[in-house]
């Protein structure tokens, strides 16, 4: 019997594919976002309203990750933007290879923001880099203010955190200060947005920040 | 469910390395898994048993060395170990750990027959 050293990361292949995706996005000046949240947190509604609010200024493309069905993809395609649906057939997350295959359908030189809506899940998507510029982690207030403390990994990796359905704050027992403080202690940098896609409350700040991100990325490219 | 993707990658790497080394059979795969990963051993084990019959990895033992979570407190700089997902600093009591270790998912080595 022989022992051989391997020292290889099991998820190396995904990491390499994610790096390839990232290079492609950078080359085309695309800001790629990985939207992660529990099922029902309001990712699709947030995306709808985000696209609606910025589509006169910026070109969107969307990759929709769902276990099955194309309900969300049809909702977004109704906005007149290119959408590709990925069905994971039971899989709990998207991986970099799936995203790679999906964006072959887009005219990348016409895209400013590529929004990837991951499968509803706060655990598994944390392990799989897709090549995004950053993760947007959405927590709806009815889910409870304990979620950042219970799922610290995903919140620690977020480039932006959104507390959604903020119009329901009074109806649910969500401690905004606690949730804010818990996110801040595991993630110093990510801005925290408190908004309601349904009523529009707080949407302006998020949209301005996001379009600023696109501008600064295009600026870096030009420089 | 993501254990399926993890197991597929694990088997792919193990079989490629076994072939490279001219192994007839993989007896044991030594893994280093961080406590912060979503690695569920029972699920990986089950997938592994289902996916390896007829390969060099059939019957191989999966040995896991768990890597504890190690954090550095952003407030006071203390380095500390943490059980699973608790990032609270024992020194100053705030949830402020910067993760240093605990996200590993490595094949460290394999024992093979050749």
Image (spheres, grey):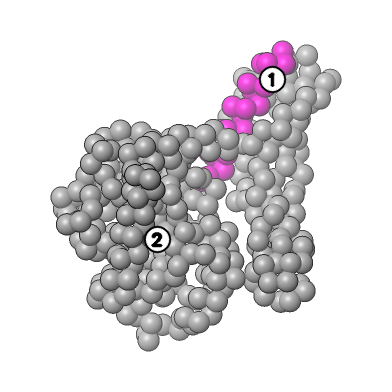
Q: Magenta span covers which residues?
A: B1-22
On the image, numbered disc 1 is attached to which residue? B18
In the displayed structure image, the side of residue A134 where residue A215 appears, left or right: left
Residue B72, how many percent across, how many down? Answer: 71, 62
Mostly what secondary structure, the magenta segment?
helix
Residue A40 occupies quadrant: bottom left
Residue B99, how many percent across, how many down? Answer: 66, 57
The residue closer to the viewer here, B78 or B69, is B78
The stretch drawn in magenta includes residue A179: no
| Residue A118 visible from this viewpoint | no
In the displayed structure image, the side of residue A10 where residue A76 appears, left or right: left
Residue A39: numbered disc:
2
Circle 2 packing at 10 Å, graded few (<14), some (14-19), many (20+), is: few
Residue at 62 percent of width and 33 percent of height: B10
The residue closer to the viewer here, A67 or A201, is A201
The stretch drawn in magenta includes residue B10: yes
């Amino acid at each position: 019997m022989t022992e051989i050293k391997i020292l290889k990361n099991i998820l190396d292949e995904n990491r390499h594919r994610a790096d390839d995706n990232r290079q492609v996005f950078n080359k085309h000046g695309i800001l790629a976002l990985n939207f992660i949240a529990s099922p029902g947190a309001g990712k699709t509604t947030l995306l709808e309203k985000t696209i609606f609010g910025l589509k006169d200024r910026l070109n969107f493309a969307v990759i929709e990750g769902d276990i099955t069905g194309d309900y969300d993809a049809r909702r977004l395609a109704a906005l007149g933007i290119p959408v590709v649906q990925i069905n994971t057939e039971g899989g709990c997350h998207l991986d970099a290879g799936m995203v790679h295959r999906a964006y072959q359908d887009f005219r990348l030189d016409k895209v400013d923001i590529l929004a990837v809506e991951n499968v509803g899940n706060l655990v598994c998507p944390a392990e799989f880099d897709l090549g995004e510029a950053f993760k947007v982690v959405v927590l709806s207030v009815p889910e409870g203010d304990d979620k950042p403390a219970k799922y610290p990994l995903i919140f620690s990796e977020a480039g932006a955190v959104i507390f959604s359905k903020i119009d329901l704050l009074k109806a649910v027992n969500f401690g905004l200060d606690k949730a804010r403080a818990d996110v801040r202690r595991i993630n110093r940098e990510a801005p925290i947005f408190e908004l309601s896609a349904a009523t529009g409350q707080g949407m302006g700040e998020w949209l301005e920040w996001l379009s600023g991100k696109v501008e600064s990325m295009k600026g870096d490219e030009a420089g | 469910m993501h254990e399926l993707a993890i197991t597929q990658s694990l088997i792919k790497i193990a079989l490629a390395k076994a072939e490279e080394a001219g192994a007839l059979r993989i007896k044991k795969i030594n893994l280093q898994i961080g406590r912060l990963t979503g690695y569920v051993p029972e699920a990986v084990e089950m997938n592994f048993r289902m996916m390896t019959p007829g390969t060099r990895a059939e019957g191989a033992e999966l040995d896991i060395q768990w890597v504890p979570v190690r954090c550095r407190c952003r407030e006071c700089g203390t380095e500390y170990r943490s059980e699973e997902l608790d990032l609270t600093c024992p020194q100053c009591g705030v949830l402020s750990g910067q993760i240093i270790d605990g996200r590993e998912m490595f094949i460290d080595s394999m024992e093979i027959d050749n």
